[in-house]
Image (cartoon, helix red, strand yellow):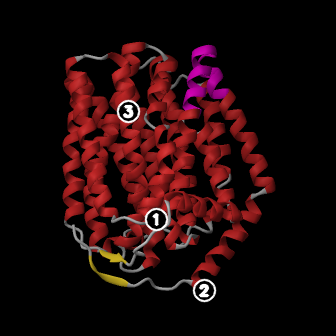
């Protein structure tokens, strides 16, 4: 795995700034995402409440992401991110205040998490779309997407480990406060970027027309709708394992917040390994050949996790789960961005975001209800079995055509793409 090949997007100044700022900020984000479920479960001892707060933190974005995608194709993405990152910082400070004062109960935590979901709808689509504008040469787009995933998962590795050690010392509120301060890093990096903006038509069609055009394009493309189906499968049944990690740590393994932190860290290390593997490749189209196996691997790990009470074995299993999920999601994200026209990028990424943010919390609610009803072992076994069956069906009927049609779509785009006019430096 040559380091120069992995880090080739670092040749672009804007991406270096983005990487540094996001890296620091996301560590704080993962500290908050680790501390909040522990705070909720400590207050309620309820898997249902745990799933409800997680649901509130993602599902509202489902309604806003399509609209956010339209505006990501129209507005100055850096300005959008400056607003969304500032609002996310405010949310973290409010969360810290509520936790320090111990007022409002779990409903306040749920509402604050829902507000962050609404912010993230605009943040995610604009941030993903901005990657394309950070690069001087578009050949490095796939590498930049994979490195962006590695930022996220490096933070996922570091943040939970720090939170697991700090929660007994400074409490959950301290983790929220650190997260709020960490947003300063990404705000500074955004202000210091030098970006060229592209020409935009003076008159834009109504938002509804933009939504319709994006959805029509996605449904007409076999590789896009098939990859979104694969993403939907892993988001509905695989990603919600995050919701159950506190229950696995506390009930199934008999551990404390440190065990919980190490489980989250192990999953993050696996996710980082998957992202770096993809970053080392010149193209992810080869990975697309076997990516359908990821849901089956995750399902098998769920089954094994339900049968073991050994903490070290559990760490290994969640490592594989994290690696498999990120390999699938990052591969699909990269291929989608590689075959979609630039003018539709924000809208197609919004559909990706809707799939992720909409189905993951629904899956979390279902997993929480099953866990509360039948226990953590039955929940893991049931979801794991369904994942294995779905992965088998997908591989049998769709994997081969998906690979071929995705390559055809990529070659068709490359043969017809035209350079968009650069109008000069955009303002900060």
Q: Is residue 380 visible?
A: yes
Query: Magenta part of the protein: which range?
Result: 363-381
- Position of 237 relative to 21 (above/below): above
**Marks 1 and 2: CB-CB under 8 Å?**
no
Quadrant assignment, res 239: top right
User: Which residue is label 3 attached to?
Assistant: 113
Label 2 element class: helix
**Marks 2 and 3: CB-CB under 8 Å?**
no
| Depth check, front residue: 124 or 248 | 124
Q: Earlier in the sequence, mark 1 or mark 3?
A: 3
Label 3 element class: helix
Q: Which mark is residue 216?
A: none
Magenta-drawn stretch contains 373: yes
Q: Residue 301 at what x, y percent from top left?
A: 61, 37
Quadrant containing the C terminus in the rendered view: bottom left
Q: Earlier in the sequence, mark 1 or mark 2?
A: 1
Nearer mark to the viewer, of 1 and 3 = 3
């Amino acid at each position: 795995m040559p380091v120069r090949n992995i880090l080739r997007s670092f040749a672009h100044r804007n991406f270096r700034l983005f990487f540094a700022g996001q890296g620091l900020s996301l560590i704080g984000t993962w500290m908050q995402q680790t501390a909040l479920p522990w705070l909720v479960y400590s207050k309620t001892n309820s898997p249902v409440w745990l799933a409800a707060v997680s649901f509130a933190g993602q599902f509202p974005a489902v309604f806003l992401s399509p609209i956010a995608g339209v505006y990501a194709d129209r507005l100055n993405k850096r300005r959008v991110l400056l607003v969304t990152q500032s609002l996310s910082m405010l949310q973290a400070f409010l969360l810290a205040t509520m936790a320090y004062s111990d007022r409002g109960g779990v409903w306040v935590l749920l509402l604050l998490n829902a507000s962050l979901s609404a912010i993230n709808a605009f943040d995610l689509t604009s941030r993903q779309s901005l990657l394309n504008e950070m690069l001087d040469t578009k050949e490095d787009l796939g590498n930049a997407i994979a490195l962006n995933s590695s930022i996220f998962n490096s933070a996922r590795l570091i943040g939970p480990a720090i939170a697991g050690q700090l929660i007994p010392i400074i409490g959950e509120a301290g983790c929220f406060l650190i997260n709020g301060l960490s947003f300063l890093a990404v705000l500074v990096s955004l202000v210091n970027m030098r970006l060229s903006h592209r020409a935009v038509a003076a008159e834009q069609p109504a938002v509804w027309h933009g939504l319709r055009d994006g959805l029509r394009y996605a449904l007409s493309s076999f590789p896009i709708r098939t990859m979104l189906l694969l993403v939907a499968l892993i988001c509905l049944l695989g990603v919600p394992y995050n919701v159950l990690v506190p229950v696995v740590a506390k009930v199934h393994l008999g551990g404390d917040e440190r065990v919980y932190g190490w489980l989250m860290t192990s999953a993050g290390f696996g996710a980082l390994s998957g992202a770096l593997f993809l970053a080392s490749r010149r193209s992810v189209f080869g990975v697309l050949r076997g990516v359908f196996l990821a849901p089956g691997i995750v399902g098998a790990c769920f089954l094994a996790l339900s049968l073991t009470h050994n903490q070290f074995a559990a760490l290994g299993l969640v490592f594989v789960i994290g690696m498999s999920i990120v390999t699938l999601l990052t591969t699909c994200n990269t291929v989608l961005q590689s075959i979609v026209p630039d003018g539709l990028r924000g809208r197609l990424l919004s559909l990706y975001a809707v799939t992720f943010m909409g189905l993951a919390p629904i899956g979390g609610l279902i997993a929480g209800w099953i866990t509360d009803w039948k226990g953590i072992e039955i929940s893991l076994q049931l979801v794991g079995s369904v994942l294995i069956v779905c992965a088998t069906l997908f591989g049998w009927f769709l994997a081969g055509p998906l690979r071929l049609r995705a390559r055809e779509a990529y070659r068709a785009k490359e043969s017809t793409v035209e350079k968009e006019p650069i109008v000069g430096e955009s303002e900060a």
